Amino acid sequence: MKKNLFSKILVASALAGLVSCNNTSSPSPTPTTPSEQTISGVASYESHGNKYGMAVKVTFDGSKKITKVERDAAKIEELKLVEITQTSVPNMWDHEAMQSMYDEKIGDALNKFVGLDANAYYTEAAAALQVNIDDKTTWPSNTGEFATKYFVLTGATQSSTRLSVAVANACATLLGKDSIVFTTNPVVPPVSSTTPSTPTSTPSTPASTPSSSTSSTEGETSSTPEVAE
C-alpha cells in the first residue's frame, strides 16, 4: 500500500516538473518599441569669403518624434562652419557681446524643435526655407508664421534660419527625402549680338546724381550699415 502511494507521488512530481519546464521554455513574446536613433543634419552656404552654417545631432524616438537636438561641435569644426560673423572693422558691432548672447540663447533655439513630428516639421520647413542667399526677400521674416514658431533671437541675424534648415535636413535623412539647400542667383552670360549698334543722334548726358554704394553682409545687400550674421 505504502509502495503504491509512493509511486503515485513520484509520478505526480514528474508530471509537475514537465509542466513547469514547458512553461519556462516558451515564454510569451513581449511587444518591443523601435529604439531611438540620432542623425546628423547640416546646413551651409558660402558668402563673402565665409562658409556659414550649422550642424546638429537630432535624436528621434520610435514614432519619429524629435526628443533632443544638440549642436554638433565636432562637425562644425570639421566643416569650418561660421555660426556668427566676426569682423575686424572698428565700431561695427560688439562681437564679444554677440558671442555671449549666442552662447546664452542657442540652447533655447535647439529646444524649439523637441517634441515635433519629423514628417510634419520637414514638410513645413521645406515650404518656408527655399532660401536664395543673393535675394534677401526669400529669407523667412522674423515676424512671419514660421519664425514665430521656431526662431530664437541669438544675436546672429540668420542663425535661426541655418538651424532650422539643419534640423530639417536631419529629418530628411530619417524620412528618405531631399535635403534643403541654400540657392544662389544663376549666372547670366552676356548677350552677344551680331548686329552693330546704331549711334543715336542725341548724345548721352551723365546722371546728375552719383550712384550710391551699398554695404552687404552674408546673403544680404542693404543701404544701411552691416548687421551681424
Image: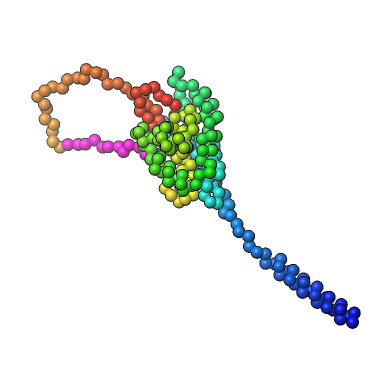
Front-most of residues 62 and 215: 62
Residue extending farthest left: 201
Q: Is residue 134 visible?
A: no
**Residue drawn at point x = 21 percent, y = 36 percent:** 191
User: In this rendering, is residue 175 above or below 143?
Assistant: below
Q: Nearer the viewer, residue 123 or 102?
A: 123
Number of numbered discs visible in the structure rendering: 0
Q: How far across and down, in percent of the image, does residue 157 sit?
A: 44, 30
- Inspect this view and state whether residue 25 appears: yes
Is residue 70 depicted above or below 157 in this figure?
A: below
How are the colours assigned in the image? Answer: rainbow
**Residue at horizontal 26 percent and vertical 19 percent from the top:** 210
Quadrant location of the N terminus?
Answer: bottom right
190 falls in the magenta region: yes
Residue projecting furthest to the right:
2
Residue 57: say if magenta. Answer: no
**Highlighted magenta segment, given as a residue range:** 182-193
Left or right: residue 178 versus residue 58 is: left
Give me the residue at 75% from left, 72% from top.
18
Name the image quarter holding residue 90: top left
Q: Quadrant of residue 34?
A: bottom right
What is the magenta segment's predominant secondary structure? loop
Q: Provide residue 20's location: percent of width, then percent of height.
A: 74, 68
Q: Residue at 51% across / 38% down in the picture? A: 112
Position of the C terminus by quadrant: top left
Q: Which of the 4 image quarters holds residue 217?
A: top left
Answer above or below: position of 213 versus 42: above
Q: Is residue 101 left or right of residue 190?
A: right
Whole-percent x, y for residue 45 in the image:
42, 36
Percent position of residue 220, x then y: 37, 30
